[in-house]
Every structure is written in C-alpha cells, then in structure tokens.
C-alpha cells in the first residue's frame, strides 16, 4: 500500500500511542522511522514498529520518558534519555548542540540510558544543513566478537559523519562496523529470505545464509580486524565516555524481554569557521569528487531517495501493514 510521508507518519504515531507512547514521543519516533524508510534504510524503518510497540507496552522502553539536559562544561551537553526512545532525545539535542558549537567552536553531546539510534546519517546531516561538521557514534547490543574471538562483545556500532557543501547537498558518511547493519538480517528473518554468506556467522562460528542463525550468532566485522578495532573505539566513545551500558551489558532491541538497553550515543559538532576552515574550502573536496565521472559522493543516494519519496510516497509491505493493524487493535 502506498502512503504519503505525512500519512505514514500519522499511521506510525497512532500505532505507538496505542502502545503506551506519549503523543510527542510518538511523533518523534514516527518521523525517524518513516524518514529512514524513505531513505531506503528499511532495516531502521517501519519493520521496527512491532519491537518498539511491544517494548513500550512492556516498559522495556519508557514511551513517556522526558530527556534531561545539563551542561557541566561550556562545550559539553549531557543528555539522559531516561530509558526512553532515542529519537526524542536526539531531536532535542540537535538544536542545543548546534548553538553550543557556534558559541564554542566545538561541542559534544553525551547521550546515555538510550535506545536504538536508527540511521545516524540522518542526524549528522541536520548539522551539515546548519553549516556545521558533525561526527556521531552509537553502540548497540552485542552481536560482534572481538577479532579472533567468538563471544559477542561489540554491537554493529555505527559511525556517521557529515560536512556541508556550498550550494549542494551535504557529504554524509554512515556505516555500521559489521559487514551490514543487523537490521538487514532482522528484515530478512521477517521476510523469510536467506542472507549472503559474508554477513554473519552462525552459533557454530561458521558463515551462514540462514537469517535466523545469523541473528543467533555473530556479525562479521567490516574489514576484518580493522572493523573489530573500530567497533571497540565506538564502545569507548559511545558508552565509556557517556556512562551508558556497554554492548555486552545491553538487552536486545528486537524483543520486549529484559531490562532497558540503556545504550549510549556521542555527537561532536564543529563550526569550521572557528578552526581555520570555511564553507568554500570544505566544498572543494566534494567538487573534485563530483568532477570525476563515475565517482560517487557518499550520502547522495539516500537524499535522492527521500526526495523521490516526497513525490511518490512509500510502499508499506502487506506484512508490515498486518502487524500495524494488529498493534492498533
């Protein structure tokens, strides 16, 4: 079924409200999930509605949480997501952190006791739209072993970066440190599809094409040992610095069992005019890439997908609609 983005957001928000989520929080979450879907990131999109709703209903995620903010230092913003969904905390963090970065030149937000942060590229892009450079990291429940190990300790732990480009769309880099985001395996489970053999190891430590075995096993790190080392770095930045739970301490984002995940996110925003840069100088690199026929500037595909979705709407698969209907009942 085809829905406009506005219709889809209303449908998702209404569903969440019927499952113990406040109106304000439901709108924030709905906007994030629909935007992810429109960008072509279905693993972070509408297929999350069921887990989110069940977790709110069970109290694993507090649908009525109100984020709390403090500034212990002039360029440090501490954010307590209060065991709620990440998006209300992120939505309220972005304008605060952007103002701090303009005043101080650089500012950092440390978000703790949070949840699934979704498509990090969509968050850092908002800073680039304001003329700022931004870096964001987030940890996730353990699904990836240290290099050479078999016990999951790290999450897929995404990293995202964005920089403004004068007169054009921003440069946006967003990548999970596993070969693929875990949400893609979750989506394959829901669809009953197999997965490529380079996505995950099964519980026996061997590569698998069985999506369910992949969820039960461990993710393959992107770039082998280098990806595993970067995942450890994200653990330090997202959880160690913020006081949030490490990946191995967190509960699943895919079910309503256990305690709140209490994950962490860190965002660093920089005003390039404070560090000797300028918008025109920042844009030079992207312009050189664009001049190379066939070269691709990261982030443009998702931005173009969203533009098309504004015109054409998004297609909500029948199984997702069935889930939404059941949750609204």
Image (cartoon, rainbow, N blue to C red):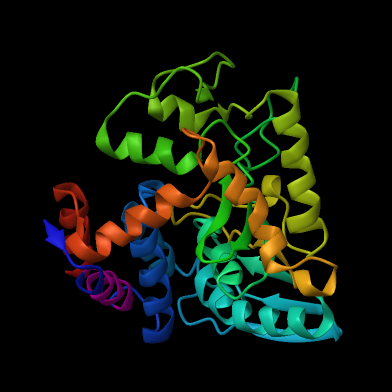
Q: Is residue 267 magenta?
A: no
Q: Is residue 161 above or below residue 97?
A: above
Q: Is residue 110 left or right of residue 116?
A: right
Q: Position of residue 97 (x, y in %)?
A: 69, 79
The region drawn magenta spans 8-17
Q: Quadrant of the C terminus?
A: bottom left
Q: Quadrant of residue 220?
A: top right
For the point 66% across and 54% down, the residue is 284
Considering the image in quadrants, where does the N terminus appear?
bottom left
Quadrant in which residue 324 is drawn: bottom left
Q: Is residue 301 above or below residue 185?
A: below
Q: Please state which of residues 273 and 10 is positioned toward the viewer in this rendering.
A: 273
Say if 215 sits above or below 138 in the image: above
In the image, farthest residue toward the top: 206
Residue 141 seen anywhere in this rendered image of the structure: no
Q: Quadrant of residue 281?
A: bottom right
Percent position of residue 66, x then y: 56, 85
Can you give x and y, in whole percent of width and height, for residue 43 in the image? 40, 47
Q: Main secondary structure of the magenta part?
A: helix
Q: Is 96 in front, or is 274?
A: 274
Q: Residue shown at 64%/46% (left/top)? A: 157
Asked whether, in this view, residue 125 is left or right of residue 139, the answer is left
């Amino acid at each position: 079924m085809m829905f406009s983005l506005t219709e889809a957001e209303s449908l998702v928000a209404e569903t969440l409200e019927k499952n113990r989520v406040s109106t304000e929080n439901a709108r924030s979450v709905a906007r994030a999930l629909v935007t992810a879907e429109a960008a072509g990131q279905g693993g972070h999109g509408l297929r999350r509605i069921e887990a989110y709703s069940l977790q709110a209903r069970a109290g694993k995620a507090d649908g009525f949480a109100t984020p709390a903010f403090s500034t212990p230092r002039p360029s440090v913003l501490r954010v307590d997501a209060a065991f709620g969904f990440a998006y209300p905390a992120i939505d309220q963090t972005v304008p605060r952190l952007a103002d701090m970065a303009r005043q101080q030149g650089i500012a950092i937000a440390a978000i703790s006791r949070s949840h699934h942060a979704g498509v990090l590229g969509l968050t850092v892009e908002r800073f680039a739209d304001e003329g700022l450079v931004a870096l964001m990291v987030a940890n996730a429940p353990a699904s990836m072993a240290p290099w050479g190990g078999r016990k999951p300790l790290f999450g897929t732990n995404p990293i995202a970066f964005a920089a403004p480009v004068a007169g054009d769309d921003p440069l946006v880099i967003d990548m999970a440190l596993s070969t693929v985001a875990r949400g893609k395996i979750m989506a394959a489970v829901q669809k009953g599809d197999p997965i490529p053999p380079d996505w995950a190891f099964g519980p026996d430590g061997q590569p698998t094409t069985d999506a369910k075995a992949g969820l039960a096993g461990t993710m393959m790190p992107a770039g082998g040992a280098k990806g595993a080392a970067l995942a450890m770095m994200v653990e330090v930045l997202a959880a160690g610095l913020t006081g949030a739970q490490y990946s191995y301490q967190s509960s699943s984002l895919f079910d309503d069992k256990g305690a709140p995940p209490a994950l962490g996110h860190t965002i660093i925003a920089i005003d390039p005019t404070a560090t000797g840069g300028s918008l025109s100088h920042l844009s030079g690199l992207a312009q050189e890439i664009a001049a190379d026929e066939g070269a691709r500037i990261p982030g443009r595909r998702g931005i173009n997908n969203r533009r098309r979705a504004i015109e054409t709407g998004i297609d909500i698969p029948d199984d997702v609609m069935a889930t939404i209907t059941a949750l609204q009942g």
